[in-house]
Amino acid sequence: MQVPDRVAPIVDFIFPPRCPLCGAAVARQGGLCAACWPTLAIPSEPSCPGCGRPFAGAAAPGTRCAPCLAQPPAHDGIVAATLYNAAARRLVIAFKHGRRIALAPLLGRLISARLTASRSLGAGEPWLVVPVPIHRWRLWHRGFNQSALLARDIAARIGGELIVDAMVRRRATPILGGLGRTARERALRGAIALKAGTAARIRGASVLLVDDVLTSGATSNACVRALKRAGAKTVVIACFARVLDEALPPDRA
């Protein structure tokens, strides 16, 4: 939640701004200190136009990575603010599990900046902004959908139309963190669908699908398939942190 400008000085006086990673004093709430900014792994260029995967060396414009060539993705691009490392992990854990929802503007700002830099959204094209859904039981337990908080912030920054409840999890799924790619896909089969009455708004639209972390892509791919079945023209995935396959243990890739 963004603090209104008129009350920000009062909040800063009562709760002096601190870096969420190291606790050092910073200029504003939700900002990182100068020492911690470089610890985030910002994706480099050139990158694959299909999935945003950074190339290790030089690549001709339009060159796609081996995974995209072997199995073309259903989505139309991935934009990640950072690559998943120790700093990104600490921010995600604080945001999602530590319930520090005041971090949403920081993460949303980083994602939006990356979207602008990558030119993934085109010029002047209207976008629907849709969060990855969580099951109602998890929502009751956590109290919020972290992807919805990010989607709300991003929609305000890029001028997109937020549809916070466009999709639903029809059944609870196990925690996917310890599962491999095949097991994740099996667990999610049929679990995600469009909410009744939403298809008309999705048909022919360009959709920005928002999540906090992209690991194997099983959850986002299930969402992409549901959106494409409803007639979405374009679906671009935006996330704060992305785990590259080579960063995963073999049984998780």
Image (tube, helix red, strand yellow):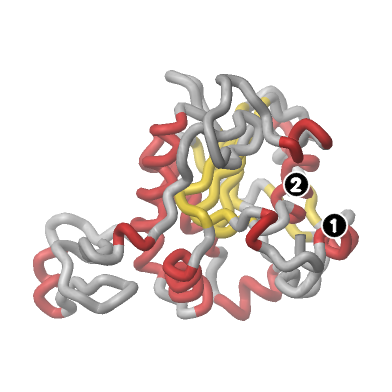
Q: Is residue 159 visible?
A: no
Q: Secondary structure at mark 2?
A: helix
Residue depicted at x 79% and y 74%: 174
Which residue in the protein does label 2 denote? 221
Q: Please determine whether, in this image, residue 195 is positioned above or below residue 170.
A: above
Residue type at mark 2: give it: Asn
Residue nearest the viewer, comparing 217 with 141: 217
Q: Is residue 221 visible?
A: yes
Rendered location of residue 198, percent (x, y): 70, 40
Which residue in the protein does label 1 denote? 185
Question: What is the quadrant of the N terminus in the image?
Answer: bottom left
Residue nearest the viewer, comparing 226 with 111: 111
Label 1 crowd bin: few (<14), some (14–19), many (20+), radius 10 Å: some
Q: Quadrant of residue 107?
A: bottom left
Residue nearest the viewer, comparing 43 with 225: 43
Rendered location of residue 223, percent (x, y): 73, 47
Question: What is the quadrant of the C terminus in the image?
Answer: bottom right
Residue depicted at x 24% and y 65%: 35
Residue type at mark 1: give it: Glu
